[in-house]
Amino acid sequence: HNILDTLLVNTMLSVAAERLPSNEKIIVHSDRGAHYRWPGWIGLMDKFGFTRSMSQKGSTPDNAQAESFFGHLKTEFFYNRSWIGKSIDDFIQALNEYIGWYNTKRRKKVLGGKSPQKYRQSKIA
């Protein structure tokens, strides 16, 4: 693995850990890149009490769903507003609101025009 990639992801993880409330239950989703599987990264995740989440090995559908969500998150939530002067608490609150909206209100064509929550409920019933 590339030492610069490793340094980047470790630094970002450490900065995030410093800024997040200690009572938050954090799940970090990543691909299976070498820098997310090496002992240093795993040690940092354990140190901060974060839960690791990865797509299944060789599972294109898992990765496609995660990539689709993060693409929507960036274009619908992050890029279309100014974050200047916003605190990390403001950001977390807005992110939680977006994820709530995404899961309960946002309709997806591939889910038959249902929100993810309504689609899951229809599959259980």
Image (cartoon, helix red, strand yellow):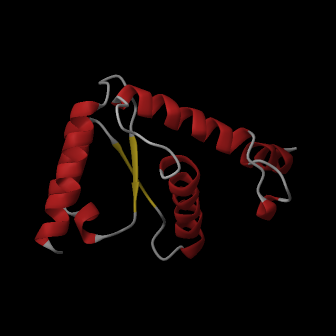
Above or below, comparing residue 22 to residue 119 in the picture: above
Residue at 79 percent across and 59 percent down: it is 111
For the C terminus, the quadrant is top right
| Residue toward you, 75 or 22 | 75
Q: How many marks?
A: 0
Residue 75 is situated, as x and y percent measured from the top left of the image, at 55, 57
Residue 63 is situated, as x and y percent measured from the top left of the image, at 52, 68
| Residue toward you, 119 or 5 | 5
Residue 36 is situated, as x and y percent measured from the top left of the image, at 28, 61
Residue 49 sits in which quadrant?
Answer: top left
Residue at 43 percent across and 34 percent down: it is 91
Residue at 35 percent across and 22 percent down: it is 23
**Horizontal relation, residue 109 to residue 102: left or right:** right
Residue 64 sits in which quadrant?
Answer: bottom right
**Horizontal relation, residue 52 to residue 60: left or right:** left
**Horizontal relation, residue 24 to residue 46: left or right:** right
Above or below, comparing residue 73 to residue 20 in the picture: below
